[in-house]
Amino acid sequence: MLIILNLVNQKSIDMKLKKILLSVAFLLVVNMASAFTIRYYNNDSQNYTMEVRSNGSTQKIEFTSSTTGSTSVQTSASEIEIKTSCGWVKVKDGAKISIKNGCIKIE
């Protein structure tokens, strides 16, 4: 009888552990898949590829010439830094920016 009760309790613990592990895994995947979005207007007649720094890693983003658009960066950060010809610029998630002469201005 004790063996059966131990098996039932073990199965209950295993199910709870599985639920907890699946919940943690889901939260990690959701957090990793989050995207940082920037709305932009590029006043210049040339495309730009700029370096982005966030959470200690770097990526590249592209801004199309003479266009209003949006671009995204895969990061969980709420703020990134973009390297322009005028230096590094801090940009917050959802920000609207304009590009002129290769420099970024936050609107």
Image (cartoon, rainbow, N blue to C red):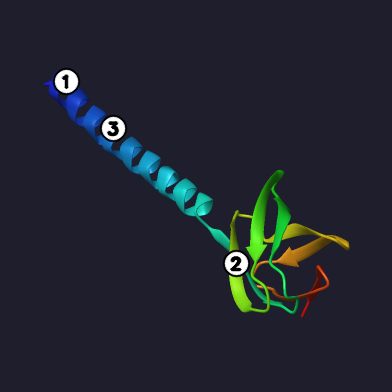
Up the image or down, 106 lies above or below 12; here it is below
Residue 103 x/y as whole percent:
83, 69
Image-based side of 104 in relation to 41, left or right: right
Please name which of the two marks, 3 or 1, marks the residue nearer to the observer: 3
Q: Amino acid at mark 3?
A: Asp
SS class of the residue under badge 1?
A: helix
Please name which of the two marks, 2 or 3, marks the residue nearer to the observer: 2
Please name which of the two marks, 1 or 2, marks the residue nearer to the observer: 2
Residue 9 x/y as whole percent:
23, 30
Up the image or down, 18 lies above or below 91; here it is above
Residue highlighted by disc 3: 14
Q: Residue at x 69, y 73 (%)?
A: 95
Query: Which residue appears farthest toward the right when viewing the image?
Result: 86
Residue highlighted by disc 2: 71
Q: Amino acid at mark 1?
A: Leu
Q: Residue at x 72, y 58 (%)?
A: 50
Q: Please state the total of marks drawn on the protein image.
A: 3
Residue 52 x/y as whole percent:
71, 54
Query: Which residue appears farthest toward the left when viewing the image?
Result: 1
Front one among 22 and 3? 22
Residue highlighted by disc 1: 2
CA gap between label 1 and label 2 equals 62 Å
Q: Residues within 10 Å of mark 1 (few under 14, many from 20)?
A: few
SS class of the residue under badge 3?
A: helix
Disc with the residue nearer the chain's start (1 vs 2): 1
Q: Residue at x 18, y 25 (%)?
A: 7
Residue 48 x/y as whole percent:
71, 63
Query: Which residue appears farthest toward the front when viewing the image?
Result: 45
